Image (cartoon, helix red, strand yellow):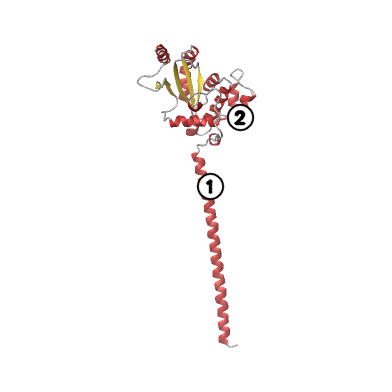
C-alpha cells in the first residue's frame, strides 16, 4: 500500500472519529436541553400551585369546603342562608350581617344585644343573622368559617341564639385565630345548657356546614354590602350613619313605630 493511500485512510478514520465526537456533543447538548425543559416545567407548575395557594387566602378549611351545601335546620331566607331569632309572626325584621372574628360586630352586639332580645321576646322583632367570613380572607386563618360552621351546628340543636351570644362575649383579638380550633368552639358551647352532645361535636369537627358558611359569605360579597356589621330594619340600612348614629333607644322606637303601622 502506498504512503498516499495509507494517509488517505488515516484521514478518513480521523474524520469519522471527529464526526462521532461531534455527534456525541450534539446528543449531550440535546439531552441537556430536554432535562432543562423538564426542570422549567416542574418549576412552572410549582409556581402555579404556589400562586393558587397564595390566592386561597390561607384558609385551610374554606378552600376544602366544596362539598354539598347543608343548611342548618330551620335556616331562613333565599337559599336558607340566614339564622333566625324571634317569632316568625313579628311585623318587623332586622337583618344583621356579621363575622364572628369582627371587632365591630362584637361592639354592636355588646351595645344592642339586650334591646334586640327584649324586642324579639315581645314578638315585636324577628332577626335574621347572615354570617360572613371576611376576617379569614383579610388576616388569614379559618376562625370565621369554623365559628360560622359551629353556629350552624348550634342551630341544628335549636340553640343558635345563646351560642351566638357566647361566641361574641368570648371573641378573641382580631389577629388571634382562636376560633379556628374546634376544641375551643366546643369548649365555649359548654356555656349553653344542653348544647354539647355527641352530634354537636361531630357536626363541628366534620365541618358539616362549611360549604353553607362559604355560600353565605359569597352571598354577602355578591350583595356588595359595605362591611360587617351591616344592619337593616325592614330593608333599610340603619347602622353606620355618623350624622345620625343609631342607639338602642332609637332602635327600640323604630321597631315600636313600625309595629304600629
Q: Is residue 155 above or below residue 13?
A: above
Which residue shows up at 51% across the image and 50% down it? 44
Dividing the picture into quadrants, the one containing residue 163 is top right
How busy is the neighbourhood of tag 2: few (under 14 within 10 Å), some, or many (20 plus)?
some
Which residue shows up at 53% across the image and 59% down it? 33
Dividing the image into 4 quarters, which one contains the N terminus? bottom right
Q: Is residue 251 above or below residue 227?
A: above
Residue denoted by label 1: 46
Residue denoted by label 2: 205
Q: Is residue 246 left or right of residue 159?
A: left
Secondary structure under tag 1 reads: helix
Dividing the image into 4 quarters, which one contains the C terminus? top left
Does residue 176 show up? no
How busy is the neighbourhood of tag 1: few (under 14 within 10 Å), some, or many (20 plus)?
few
Q: CA distance from mark 1 to mark 2?
A: 31 Å
Secondary structure under tag 2 reads: helix
Frontmost residue, 200 versus 258: 258
Work out whether mark 1 precedes mark 2 in sequence or the reverse, and give the earlier one: 1
Amino acid at each position: 500500500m502506498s504512503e498516499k493511500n495509507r494517509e488517505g485512510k488515516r484521514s478518513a478514520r480521523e474524520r469519522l472519529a471527529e464526526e462521532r465526537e461531534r455527534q456525541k456533543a450534539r446528543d449531550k447538548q440535546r439531552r441537556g436541553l430536554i432535562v432543562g425543559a423538564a426542570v422549567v416545567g416542574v418549576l412552572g407548575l410549582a409556581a402555579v400551585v404556589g400562586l393558587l395557594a397564595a390566592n386561597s387566602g390561607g384558609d385551610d378549611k374554606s378552600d376544602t369546603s366544596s362539598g354539598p351545601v347543608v343548611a342548618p335546620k330551620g335556616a331562613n331566607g333565599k337559599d336558607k342562608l340566614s339564622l333566625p331569632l324571634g317569632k316568625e309572626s313579628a311585623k318587623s325584621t332586622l337583618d344583621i350581617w356579621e363575622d364572628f372574628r369582627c371587632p365591630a360586630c362584637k361592639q354592636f352586639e355588646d351595645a344592642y344585644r339586650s334591646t334586640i332580645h327584649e324586642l324579639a321576646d315581645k314578638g315585636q322583632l324577628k332577626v335574621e343573622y347572615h354570617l360572613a367570613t371576611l376576617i379569614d380572607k383579610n388576616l388569614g386563618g379559618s376562625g370565621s368559617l369554623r365559628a360560622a360552621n359551629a353556629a350552624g351546628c348550634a342551630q341544628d340543636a335549636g340553640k343558635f341564639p345563646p351560642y351566638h351570644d357566647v361566641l361574641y362575649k368570648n371573641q378573641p383579638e382580631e389577629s388571634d385565630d382562636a376560633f379556628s380550633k374546634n376544641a375551643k368552639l366546643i369548649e365555649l358551647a359548654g356555656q349553653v345548657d344542653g348544647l354539647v352532645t355527641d352530634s354537636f361535636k361531630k357536626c363541628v369537627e366534620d365541618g358539616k356546614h362549611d360549604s353553607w358558611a362559604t355560600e353565605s359569605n359569597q352571598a354577602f360579597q355578591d350583595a356588595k354590602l359595605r362591611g360587617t356589621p351591616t344592619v337593616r330594619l325592614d330593608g333599610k340600612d340603619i347602622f353606620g350613619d355618623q350624622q345620625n348614629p343609631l342607639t338602642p333607644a332609637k332602635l327600640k322606637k323604630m321597631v315600636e313605630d313600625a309595629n304600629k303601622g
